[in-house]
């Protein structure tokens, strides 16, 4: 890659990083203001879990729909549409007066939030050299927790003075403001041929050439880990508040978790410059499982709890930030946005299940040590899924396959069907 190409790749990655930040803030903002909204709108824990779930259902649908559409019609147009939808519907959330209204608005806005990440992951991967692809996609996706950290810190400072609505006003405005740099700085790519676009529409094409087994193993790992993090990110502020922590400080629990995620993802991005990302992520999840179990024993201990939250962020959430990079490594260019979209959709499904189950368990007053012990077991299951994906990928001969060869094979195979 020459200097001009490297410059262009860096600029594209920076814009995608900013989009990822906005997406992270908009996706997780509800957890920052959950205690205030619960009180203001008289929403119980079970109903609050359903509001979280509605938003994540929207992101699942958005990931599945926008990924293939981005492969077919272009990454840039679909990213613009996703940002516009996210911005407008997030602004509308500030006007909600009930749990049902908020759930509907979060669902529709989630279509845009879910569609943004597959598009920016594919754009970043295709602007980078093959050697730097995994690390650059991980670095781009670090914007997601960074957006949550910055947004959470600002939210904690402003929401007690201006009300919970200010958080939605900020999120919607930021999303709409990103339209200008995306329009002007992201290059448009040519839409594939009719043969390729037919391939994008079929799940069978995504799983072709031996990718089915590693993809399903990866998706199981993604699902399990996102159930855990979906619960943690959504309900840690609420759990802290239940244990006597003021709402503004409780919101910082989600911030600490995401600061740890940034540190963990930075470490993993350095590791995967020299090797494939699958096995380091599996090892990270094993550490995350042990720390998640410990978290249930430290509720109410104060400083020790926040320190453990940070480490859970490093090992568990930090590992999850590699999923777009892993998917970009597993799926070739012709179906990359589709493959990333399906991977993120599976993850978002876990983010639906986690808050809903967590809300019900909290409503039934399940002991914290049992609640977090169950989360630790799920995290171990996630480690096994990622490890199996690595093993089966190598068994299918995909580890050494070049992107160009994979793309050619895909098109030829589709042409025979």
Image: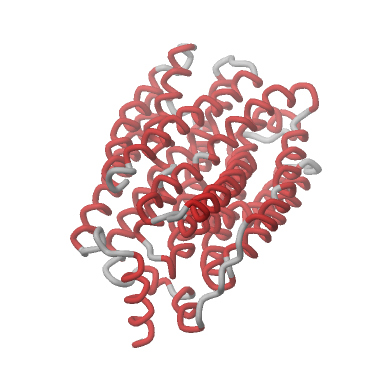
x, y percent for residue 280: 29, 40
x, y percent for residue 162: 80, 26
Residue visible at 58% across and 68% down in the picture: 74
Give the vertical position of 202 relative to 374 (above or below).
below
Nearest the eye: 141 or 34: 141
Quick check: can you spot residue 50?
A: no
Nearest the eye: 372 or 7: 7
Residue visible at 68% across and 35% down in the picture: 43
x, y percent for residue 371: 41, 30
Quick check: can you spot residue 416?
A: yes
x, y percent for residue 108: 67, 55
Q: Residue farthest to the left? A: 395
Q: Residue farthest to the front? A: 3
Quadrant, the C terminus: bottom left
Give the vertical position of 11 relative to 271 (above or below).
below
The quarter holding residue 154 reads: top right
Give the vertical position of 364 relative to 398 (above or below).
above
Give the vertical position of 237 relative to 14 (above or below).
above
Residue visible at 72% across and 35% down in the picture: 167
**In screen coordinates, is 341 left or right of 21?**
left
**In screen coordinates, is 239 left or right of 137?**
right
């Amino acid at each position: 890659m020459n200097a001009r190409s490297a410059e262009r790749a860096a600029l594209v990655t920076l814009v995608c990083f900013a989009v990822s930040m906005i997406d992270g803030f908009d996706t997780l903002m509800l957890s920052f203001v959950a205690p205030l909204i619960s009180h203001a709108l008289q929403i119980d824990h079970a109903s609050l879990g359903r509001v979280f779930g509605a938003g994540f259902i929207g992101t699942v649908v958005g990931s599945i729909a926008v990924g293939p559409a981005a492969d077919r019609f272009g990454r840039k147009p679909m990213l613009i549409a996703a940002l516009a939808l996210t911005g407008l519907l997030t602004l509308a959330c500030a006007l909600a007066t009930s749990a049902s209204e908020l759930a509907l608005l979060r669902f529709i806005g989630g279509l845009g939030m879910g569609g943004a990440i597959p598009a920016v992951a594919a754009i970043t991967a295709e602007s980078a050299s093959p050697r730097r692809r995994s690390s650059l996609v991980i670095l781009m996706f670090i914007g997601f927790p960074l957006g949550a950290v910055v947004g959470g810190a600002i939210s904690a400072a402003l929401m007690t003075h201006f009300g919970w609505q200010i958080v939605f006003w900020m999120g919607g405005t930021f999303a709409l403001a990103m339209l200008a740099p995306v329009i002007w700085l992201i290059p448009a790519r040519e839409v594939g041929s009719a043969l390729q676009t037919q391939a994008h529409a079929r799940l069978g094409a995504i799983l072709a050439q031996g990718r089915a087994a590693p993809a399903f193993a990866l998706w199981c790992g993604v699902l399990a880990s996102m159930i855990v993090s979906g619960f943690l990110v959504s309900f840690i502020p609420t759990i802290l508040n239940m244990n006597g922590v003021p709402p503004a400080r409780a919101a910082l629990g989600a911030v600490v978790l995401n600061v740890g995620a940034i540190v963990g993802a930075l470490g993993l991005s350095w590791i995967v410059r020299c090797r494939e990302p699958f096995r380091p992520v599996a090892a990270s999840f094993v550490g995350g499982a042990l720390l998640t179990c410990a978290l249930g024993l430290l509720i109410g201990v104060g400083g020790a709890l926040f320190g453990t939250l940070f480490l859970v962020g490093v090992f568990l959430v930090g590992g999850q930030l590699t999923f777009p990079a892993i998917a970009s490594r597993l799926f070739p260019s012709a179906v990359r946005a589709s493959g990333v979209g399906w991977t993120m959709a599976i993850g978002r499904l876990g983010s639906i299940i986690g808050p809903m189950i967590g809300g019900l368990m909290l409503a039934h007053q399940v002991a914290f040590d049992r609640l977090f012990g169950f989360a630790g077991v799920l995290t171990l299951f996630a480690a096994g899924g990622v490890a199996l994906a690595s093993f089966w990928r190598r068994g299918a001969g995909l580890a050494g396959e070049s992107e160009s060869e994979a793309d050619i094979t895909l098109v030829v195979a589709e042409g025979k069907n």
